[in-house]
Image: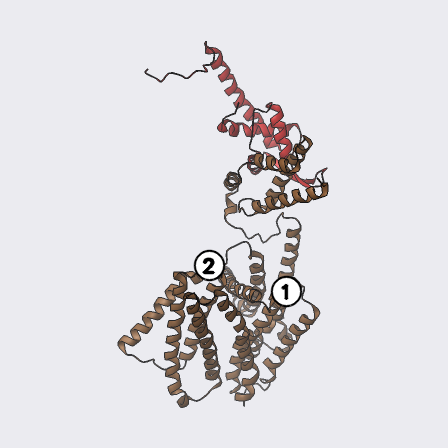
Amino acid sequence: MAAPDCAIRIEEQFERWRSYLRRRRAIHDSDVEELEDHLREQVSALVDAGLSDDEAFLVAVKRMGNLDALSREFAREHSERLWKQLVVAPGATGERGASAGNEAAVAFCLAGIAAVAVKAPELFGLRLDEDPGFYARNLSLFVLPLLTGYFVWKRRSDPATRRWLAAAFVAAAVFANVYSLPPGISSGEYTELLTAMHLPIALWLVVGIAYAGGRWGEVGGRMDFVRFSGELFIYYVLIALGGVVLTGFMMAMFQAIGIDTEPFFVRWMLPSGALGAVVIASWLVEAKQSVIENMAPVLTRLFTPLFAIVLLAFLATMTWTGRGLDFQRDILIAFDLLLVIVLGLLLYAISARDAQTPADAFDVMQVVLVISALLADAVALWAIAARISEFGFTPNRVAALGENLILLVNLAWSAVLYLRFLRGRGSFASLERWQTAYLPVYAGWAAIVVILFPPLFGP
Amino acid sequence: MDINKDLVAASSTPLVLAILADEDSYGYAILRRVRELSGGRMQWTDGMLYPVLHRLERLGYIEARREVSESGRRRKYYRITARGRTQLAEERRQWQAVDATLREVWSALSCPLPTRRLLPQGA
């Protein structure tokens, strides 16, 4: 019996035992360490008593007792552990804690920079209340480069990637501002709003590339970014709710001593807080990744059937009563939003689904949702197509129409792929691949709106 | 002879506290000490000691510190606190009372301990 060989085998057994124990939620890493120390002492004592390594290991594990019972005891003692806690302050987890603390420091620094950056233009005389257009166009540029920087730092991106990311932001800054230089031209406002809305969408892809590190080319890397985006949205909303409560209290308390804090809120707290929170929320999502269940898929599960019911009821009522769509200015935007929501529901259902499991009732519900949304949208497009020549092609309408078509194509092909999967003639992975491959299309269209629309429709 | 689970559980607090009152120690050594002291009659399932230690730590009777042991691994050592000593004294009084009572009962039993089955009542 070769001793080193044996030592490797026993190490493997320890490793397996450790990973088995780690899967239990009530037993933390530090407990595993403590129990392992015990196991090793026991093994070495038994080996000293004349047992072989394997025998000693078996006896020691047996003496440790039933792990289910043990984990129950731990759960009884530490009931809080069954609630997964997001420990923001670095815990007593050794090296992992140290790097987590480091990361928190970086995140808070970047959030602070974002909060200050949005106030920096005031030094050059650009005040929010005097030139809201400038802030609207550049809003994403105050925070997204910092967020990208955070991921570049975290994923240790290589210099070439860094240069490309930086170039993207420089280009964005140029295109956001170059066309709108002469202020006070009224027709510029149209596209200014479009730029303000589309620049973040285009730049979000840049953030995604930084987020994915080297994995942007893979389905998995992009899907992780989709998951991240959904969770970020939820965390951001939660932080915003907290901010509302804080603001309410602040205003009420200072009101009581006769000080009006509204100017401070409007000029400092709201812009700085809103931008800083993006970085903080991203950091929280990163930190909690493995700790707490993802919320977006849970909401998806809840709302997919409800949205499907509403859409079906809408279609049924429309057919039954024979009412046509009332064509209004915003109808296209409303249907764009509907498609975005349906796409979101589809995307987050996909993101949480194990591609290996067979189709179930929820998948059927998804298909019903997608098809009913497509039908509703087709009705809307029909109504618009009939009237569009009458109303003319404004930049807003072209942008909204383009988005509608992009979403329509995505959902239509998704429906086809989903149906194939339901009939057992396609794999779920192909649906996943389609969705992740489609991500650059949204950013591409948004970039077109930002870059080409002002010269096309401008003065 | 196996000792009843409830008795093991009830005696675990004074045992652990008493062992730690002697000197600071860690899980495996505490168990070894229990085995020695009981002459092998008290068999704890090894893992179950740790939830007990964590409970005593939460109650403030003992406190833990991490140290690198002579084997080079990080190990959690436990030390009894002042509150733990007070608790130990209290436990000791209670157990002595139980022990004294039981002694009285045993001596009052004139016959030796029955090893045969007792007859059902009313027979």
Instruction: Residue B118: name its quadrant.
Output: top left
Q: Which mark is residue A357?
A: 2
Residue at figure coordinates x 64%, y 52% from the top left: A96
> What residue is drawn where x is 58% and y is 25%?
B89
- Residue A273 is situated, as x and y percent measured from the top left of the image, at 56, 65
Residue under the image location 57 percent in, 72 percent down: A205
> Which residue type carries mark 2?
Thr
Q: Colour of chain A?
A: brown
Instruction: Indicate left or right for A319 with A26 as reference.
Output: left
Write down the chain letter for disc 1: A
Q: Which residue lies most toward the front here?
A: A1
Which one is nearer the viewer's eye here, A122 or B84?
B84
Pick the residue in front: A438 or A457. A438
Residues under labels 1 and 2: Cα distance?
A: 36 Å
Q: In the displayed image of the protein, which residue is found farthest to the top? A: B110
- What sort of colour scheme is used for the picture? by chain
Q: Earlier in the sequence, mark 1 or mark 2?
A: 1
Badge 1 vs badge 2, beta-carbon distance below 8 Å: no
Pointer 1 residue: A150
Instruction: Identify residue type, mark 1.
Output: Tyr
Query: Residue A162 falls in which quadrant of the image?
Result: bottom right
- Residue A25 placement (x, y as % from top left): 53, 47
